[in-house]
Image (cartoon, rainbow, N blue to C red):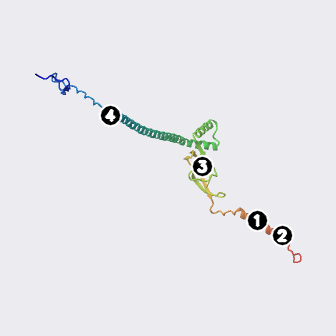
Amino acid sequence: MSAAPNSAEEPEPRVHVRDNRRIDPETYEVREPQASAAPTTHSGSAAFADRDAAVDAGAVEDGAVIELTASLAERTADLQRLQAEYVNYKRRVDRDRDLARTRSIEGVLKDFLSVLDDVRSAREHGELTGGFKAVADEIERVTTKYGLQTYGEAGDPFDPHIHEALLHAHAEGIDGPTCVEILQPGYRIGDRILRPARVAVAEPDPDAAPAEPEAEAGTQEQDERVDEAGADEPELNDQEK
């Protein structure tokens, strides 16, 4: 007679069989990979995992801030460099534009110099009358408006930078090379000479006797007066002395 099964015995553990075959043996189709079961962790491991995740997130955030700050500084430096280049370019363009305008005005005014010489000659000979005078006055007004200046007068010290000597002579009463006659006036715009003044130059005569200084002449006259006064006084004899 067989023994009855012991109800107190522990049940046998069930065996779970998983089919990990990629090919379904029935349909012969490729199976999708099964999700693996997540390992069971206790509460302490979960806390450590959360802390590590927070640390990693903070590190990622700090790294992103540093990267953005560096990128912002680089873009700011590029913008400042581009702005400086633009300012320099604008200044250079404005300077070139002003220079081109000045050169154009100078070129036009140079063509009017011969006309102004004719107007000056006609005025000196009393021929500047009537309608011709009105036209001449308007030409002089327009040229003066654009900065044309006339220079050169008799008695000016000779300067080879702004004068052109056409005649040379010696004269008395001057201390150095002097413009004694203006043959053609000079023209300039600001500090730029369009045409030097053409002049006759005189220099002191090297053969002339040098003039005596005024102080010595005054002393000599005083001595002569004293001598004349002494000659006019009568001589005294020994008894009168």
- SS state under label 3: strand
| Residue farthest to the bottom, as pictured | 238
Q: Which mark is residue 45?
A: 4
Label 1 belongs to which residue?
A: 221
Dot placed on the residue nearer the N-terminal end, 3 or 2? 3
| Residue farthest to the front, as pictured | 1
Dot placed on the residue nearer the N-terminal end, 4 or 1? 4
Q: Residues within 10 Å of mark 1 (few under 14, many from 20)?
A: few
Q: Is residue 229 above or below residue 44?
A: below
Q: Residues within 10 Å of mark 3 (few under 14, many from 20)?
A: some
Label 2 belongs to which residue?
A: 232
How far across and down, in percent of the image, does residue 130 sit? 64, 36
Name the side, left or right, on which 237 lies relative to 77.
right
Disc 3 to disc 4, C-alpha distance: 111 Å
Q: Is residue 208 above or below residue 148?
A: below
Q: Which mark is residue 183?
A: 3
- Give the amino acid at mark 3: Leu
Name the side, left or right, on which 231 lies relative to 213.
right
How far across and down, in percent of the image, does residue 121 sit? 61, 44
- Give the amino acid at mark 1: Glu
How far across and down, in percent of the image, does residue 118 sit? 59, 42
- Give the amino acid at mark 2: Asp
Q: How many marks?
A: 4
Dot placed on the residue nearer the N-terminal end, 3 or 4? 4
- Give the amino acid at mark 4: Ser
Do the residues under discs 4 and 1 have CB atoms within 8 angstroms?
A: no
- SS state under label 4: helix
